[in-house]
Image (spheres, coloured by chain):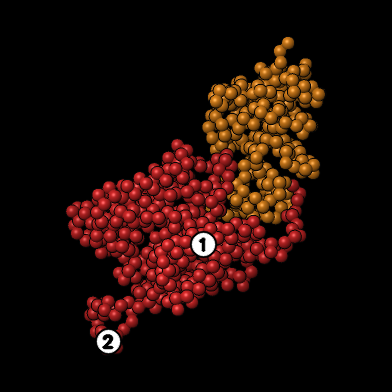
Amino acid sequence: MIQTEPGRLPVPLIEMRDISIAFGGIKAVDSVSVDLHPGEVVGLLGHNGAGKSTLIKILSGAYRADSGEILISGEPVAIASPRDAKRHGIETIYQTLALADNVDAAANIFLGRELLTPWRTLDDSAMEAETRKVMGRLNPHFRRFKEPVKALSGGQRQSVAIARAIYFNARVLIMDEPTAALGPAETKQVADLILELKKQGIGIFLISHDLHDVFDLADRVSVMKNGRVVGTARTSDVTQDEVLGMIISGKCPAGAVPGPGALRG
Amino acid sequence: MTEVAPAQAPGQSTRSLADRLREIEFDPRMIGMVLALAVIWLSFDWLSGGAFLTPRNLWNLSVQTASVAVMACGMVLVIVTRNIDLSVGSMLGFVGMVVGLVQARLLPELIGFEHPATWLISVAVAVALGGAVGLFQGALIAYLAIPSFIVTLGGLLIWRGCAWWVTQGQTIAPMDSRFKPLGGGIEGAIGTSASWAIGLVICALILIGIAFARRQRRRFGFSLRPLWAECAIAVISCGAVLGAVLIANSFALPAAIARRLVEAKGQAWPEGGLTIGHGLAVPVLLALTVGVAMSFLTKRLRFGRYVFAIGGNPEAAQLSGVNTRKVLMLVFGLMGALVGISACISTARLDAATNSAGTLDELYVIAAAVIGGTSLAGGIGSVTGAMLGALVMQSLQSGMVLIGLDTPLQNIVVGLVLVVAVWLDGIYRRRLG
């Protein structure tokens, strides 16, 4: 999947170029460019309302950008709907989890991509069997396959949402505040999962407003403020305090590549 | 994420009963509804001095339930998607008038009076017109984002007005003789031997279904229902089917008609007379067919899965790649097509098309769905429940007529039952949900 030309960097798995979107005159995302390589974890940081979630919703097909382009392995693609994004192997774990509370885990995992019998009816048994397999990997103690996900605990719901994203062999995983609702042990498990997926060559966008969650896991961080990129840096080139400065004041340190949103002067 | 199913120390006993029932896939709410129906039937039978639980009354009850039951199947889906359809009664009036016009005025001129295809064309027109009206309303709701309450409230006024407009208020009668059986009555009873045949076929299908589901679960190594539960379900379902056939068959035709039937076959009418049973009624079979088809659609097809997912979390369904607008429009289209079927049943039963047909039906249909356990908050409901709800509503009404309650008092009772039923359902959901 990695195309290498002599003397140049490998083509990024995902490249978002000059993406802008406005809601009622307010520019939620303003000429943002970010990229992601295979097996790389890129942290998207910023305050609430900085435009992180809006940016990734454009990548996952929930919103359409007003301008800018998205390239997958160097090829420009049009992502007009969540279905398009999934077709390109982009899976998303939303902050709200986006689960239908009234149906069971299998129905949620396969929602929109149901397994069918030869007679075009739902193959519930096959879906339940697959659900047991994927959930067994994420949450071995999970037994409540027949209950609506409303009845599950926060951690169990989270694993259903993660299972839905990783089951379909994603190339790119977007995780929006994946640990916001979790306790320390569960947070650790999500971190382990991210490292495992990274090893498989999956590119991961990790969105968080909490610096500490991201810093240890991410290879690079892009910081957003007021809809614009303050700067992008390798986590090895900057300190946590410097990144904190980027988030709070928009000041770009020496170790980072400044973006259009960087404080000037 | 390592959590085991949370321990529920307090309230363990109630919880485990519901869980155990769910494990063997018995829905406790459905059992509650059947019990409620039994209480209503026994009370009315007692109050009316044994006039309620007679083959005649139960047969009539089943025929009277058919029209509302058919529409309730569609209303479940509408309410599950967090919408409402207030226009079904008026739509029924409008579609009924058009059907009357088509078969009593239009088709006799085109293909001849009492043509064998008249009834079929009429039904097709009704379903197509109802479906088109439903799709149109659905498109306004789904694509123009006008609240369904408003669109269908407008529809309630508009289609009732249109129903008058079709003939400037004139009633059209009579209907085609092959169309009339759709409404029941003597010509709409299929006879005893055909009823037994249908009953046995249904029983066979039930047994095959149970065996197939069991094989499927074994294939994937899932836990199986205990064998006694499986057998109990089989015996109860088949018993109910054959019992219904038995009751319908023991409702005798009037002697004069029975005699005409016998003589038409060229046989002699015996000295002491002869009892010939009605058998199952066509509208009841039609309603049951619709119920089975809609149940299949909601449980086994992708479309039904999407309807419930939209009801549970519209945003999640959309983010999962479900075309929520299209599904929503189709739900209203389906509702309209079912109104078309009900319009045929009502028109045939009355043997006339009148512009007031279906007045207040929207309320009975919504009440049937809600009594049947459909949650107005969306995401929860079942076709079987709605059909049972329709039967509960009709039992109350027929029973009150039978014991001679005044009409205003009937309305008061129905209203109270609706409110109390939803209250009890809410308590049940909070306790055991």
Host chain of mark 2: B
What's under tag 1, amino acid-wise?
Answer: Val
Residue B296's disc is none
Question: Which residue is identified by label 2?
Answer: B270
Q: Residue at x 45, y 67 (%)?
A: B395
Q: Residues within 10 Å of mark 1 (few under 14, many from 20)?
A: some
Asked if residue A140 shows in the view, the reply is: yes
Q: Residue at x 64, y 27 (%)?
A: A51
The reply, left or right, for residue B75 in relation to residue B128 is right
Question: Which residue is identified by label 1?
Answer: B417
Element under disc 1 = helix
* Depth order, front residue of B25/B333: B333
Q: Residue at x 27, y 76 (%)?
A: B257
Instruction: From the rendered image, report the letter of the chain displayed in orange.
Output: A
- Residue B111 image offset from top left, x and y in percent: 20, 55
Which color was chain B given? red
Element under disc 2 = loop
- Residue B209 image offset from top left, x and y in percent: 52, 65
